[in-house]
Image (tube, coloured by chain):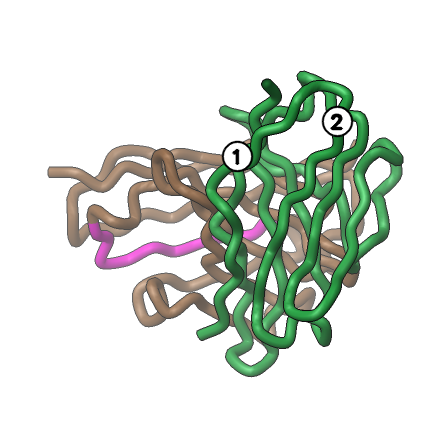
Chain colours: A brown, B green
Amino acid sequence: QVQLVESGGGVVQPGRSLRLSCAASGFVFSTYGMHWVRQAPGKGLEWVTTIWYDGNTKYYADSVKGRFTVFRDNSKNTLYLQMNSLRAEDTAVYYCARGGGSGWSVWGQGTRVTVSS
Amino acid sequence: SYVLTQPPSVSVAPGKTARIPCGGNNIGSKSVHWYQQKPGQAPVLVVYDNSDRPSGIPERFSGSKSGNTATLTISRVEAGDEAAYYCQVWDDSSDHWVFGGGTKLTIL
């Protein structure tokens, strides 16, 4: 079945780096744009970044631009989020979601990132 | 930057109709998507492109727009509809996706 599975979350000190992964299955990954969305504890959804199907176009939220990098490996059906210079305010559950022209109908279960000394 | 405004909470009795507004400048020119999120779970798409429903979403869920406001309407609400609801649009002036702040729907 169509599925997204995130991994790579954990506890990290401020200023350090972390890489999240999102493994896709059940659909042709290379034909879909993909997104990362995060949700801080007790807060709403915040869009983080979008990457087009071919990896050639990327968009970033102002809060992460210059610190986070999204990329994908279509041969491995995997989406990545490289997070550098992490801050306490990056603490959140990070979700990947499948794009498309009609809303985002496929989401992963999320991976938790805690930035704390 | 583009802002979508939702009330923090809406309350409704079982069997009644819940209406969740989402306000945004010139929202009439944008496609609005709506998501339901229950505690501890990932969001679920319930309405896309303003008023269309994905397969598997009950007909009780519907979307509309008027002026600068989009509205998610849930008819004959049930206890299982208690959740947070988020609206979403693409802002092509900034190349950003934008979520509303979310509305917590409480079934009385």
Chain at numbered mark 1: B
Can you see residue A89?
Answer: yes
The disc labelled 1 sits on which kind of residue? Lys
The furthest residue to the left: A117
Residue B11 image label: none
Q: Residue at x 84, y 43 (%)?
A: B54
User: In the rendering, at what x and y percent does residue B67 appear?
Assistant: 70, 70
Mark 1 surroundings: few (<14), some (14-19) or many (≥20) residues within 10 A: many
Chain at numbered mark 2: B
Task: Name the image quarter holding the N terminus of chain A.
Answer: top right
Question: Which residue bears the numbered disc 1?
Answer: B104
Magenta residues, start to end: A78-87
Mark 2 surroundings: few (<14), some (14-19) or many (≥20) residues within 10 A: few
Q: Nearer the viewer, residue B25 or A41?
A: B25
Q: Nearer the viewer, residue B85 or A27?
A: B85
Q: Main secondary structure of the magenta part?
A: strand
Q: Nearer the viewer, residue A36 or A78?
A: A36
Q: Residue at x 49, y 66 (%)?
A: B3
In this rendering, position of residue B28 left or right of residue A20 = right
Q: Residue at x 16, y 42 (%)?
A: A13
The disc labelled 2 sits on which kind of residue? Lys
Please tell me whether residue B88 belongs to the stretch shown in magenta: no
**Disc 2 versus disc 1: distance between alpha carbons?**
16 Å
Q: Residue at x 37, y 69 (%)?
A: A62
Q: Nearer the viewer, mark 2 or mark 1?
A: 2
Displayed quadrant of residue A114? top left
Q: Is residue B19 above or below residue A69?
A: above
Task: Name the image quarter holding the C terminus of chain A.
Answer: top left
Q: Is residue A17 above or below residue A114?
A: below
Question: Which residue bears the numbered disc 2?
Answer: B16
